Image (cartoon, rainbow, N blue to C red):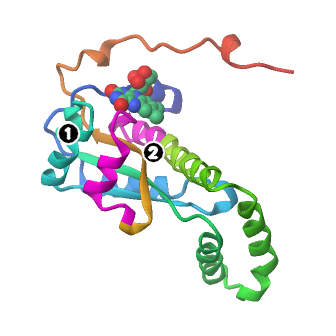
C-alpha cells in the first residue's frame, strides 16, 4: 500500500477480531520500530510484548475498561528508562564502539558532550525526554504497521502505576510511556467507517 493510502486506511481500532498477526510480521514491525530515530541516538526505552493472556487480564483493571488490551493479537508496551544519565550514554557508546569498530577513547569527547547535555536537565526533564523518545518510536510503529496492513490502537488510557506494578517495570529501571494493541479490525468495528477528522493543509501547515 502506498504511504498516504496506508495512513488513511489506519484508524484507532475499537474492537479487534480473534485473528492473530503472523509472528514474523510482528518481528518485522518491532525491527522497524527499533530503527526509530532518537535524540543523540540514545534510545532510552524498551518495547515489551505482552503475549501472556494472564498478564493482560491483570492489566485490564488498570486499562479504564479498554478490553482490547486483552482482546487483541499482541499488546506492546513502550517503556521509558527511569534512570537517565551517564549510564545511558555509556551503554550507547559501548555499542557504537562495537558496531563501528572504533576504539572507546575515540568516542570520549562525543560521550562527554552527550553527558553534559543530559546533566543540565532536572530529573523530571530527563524523564520527560525519555518519554518523548518512546513516543517517536510509537509514531514510527503506527506508520509501519499501517504500511504492513496491521491494525493498531495506541493508548494512554491506563494507569501507569498499575501497569508498572503488574509488569515489574521498576525493577527493570523502566516506566510505562504508552501502549499499543495490534491485530486485525473486527468486521463489526463501527470506527472503521468513520471519516477521519484532520485539520486541512492550510490549517495545519504554516509557512514563514
Ligand atoms: C498517544 C495516544 C493515546 C491514545 N489513547 C487512546 C486510548 O486510550 N483509547 C483509545 O481508544 N484511543 C486512543 N488513542 C487513539 C486516538 O483517539 C486516535 O488516534 C485519534 O482520535 C485519531 O483517530 P484515528 O487514529 O482513528 O485516525 C490514542 C492515540 C494516541 C496517539
In magenta, the rendered stretch is 141-170
Dot 1 surroundings within 10 Å: few (below 14), some, or many (20 or more)? some
Residue nearest the viewer, comparing 179 with 161: 161
Q: Residue 146 appears at what percent x and percent y?
A: 41, 36
Q: Is residue 10 placed above or below 131 in the rendered structure?
A: above
Task: Give the label on residue 160, or none.
Answer: none
Q: Is residue 49 magenta?
A: no
**Circle 1 residue:** 61
Question: Picture coordinates of residue 136 (x, y %)?
Answer: 56, 45
Question: Residue 19, image x and y in percent?
Answer: 16, 40
Q: Residue at x 49, y 32 (%)?
A: 2
Does residue 123 appear left or right of residue 175 in this picture? right
Residue at point 37%, 35% (across, down) = 155
| Residue 12 visible in the picture | no
Tell me which corner region of the image, top left, top right, bottom left or bottom right, holds residue 119.
bottom right
Mark-to-mark CA distance, 2 and 1: 25 Å
Provide the residue designation for mark 2: 141
User: For ligand 1, which image quadrant applies?
Assistant: top left
Amino acid at each position: 500500500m502506498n504511504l498516504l493510502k496506508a495512513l488513511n486506511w489506519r484508524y484507532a481500532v475499537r474492537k479487534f477480531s480473534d485473528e492473530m498477526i503472523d509472528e514474523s510480521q510482528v518481528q518485522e514491525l518491532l525491527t522497524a520500530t527499533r530503527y526509530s530515530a532518537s535524540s543523540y541516538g540514545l534510545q532510552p526505552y524498551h518495547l515489551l510484548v505482552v503475549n501472556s493472556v494472564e498478564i493482560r487480564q491483570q492489566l485490564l483493571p488498570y486499562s479504564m475498561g479498554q478490553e482490547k488490551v486483552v482482546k487483541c493479537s499482541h499488546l506492546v508496551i513502550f517503556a521509558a528508562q527511569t534512570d537517565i544519565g551517564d549510564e545511558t550514554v555509556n551503554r550507547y557508546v559501548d555499542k557504537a564502539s562495537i558496531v563501528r569498530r572504533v576504539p572507546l577513547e575515540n568516542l570520549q569527547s562525543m560521550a562527554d558532550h552527550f553527558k553534559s547535555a543530559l546533566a543540565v536537565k532536572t530529573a523530571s526533564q530527563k524523564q520527560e525526554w525519555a518519554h518523548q523518545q518512546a513516543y517517536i518510536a510509537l509514531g514510527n510503529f503506527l506508520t509501519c504497521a499501517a504500511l504492513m496492513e496491521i491494525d493498531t490502537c495506541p493508548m494512554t488510557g491506563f494507569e501507569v502505576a498499575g501497569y508498572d506494578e503488574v509488569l515489574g517495570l521498576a525493577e527493570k529501571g523502566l516506566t510505562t510511556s504508552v501502549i499499543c494493541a495490534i491485530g486485525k479490525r473486527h468486521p463489526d468495528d463501527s470506527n472503521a467507517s468513520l471519516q477521519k477528522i484532520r485539520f486541512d493543509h492550510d490549517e495545519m501547515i504554516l509557512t514563514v
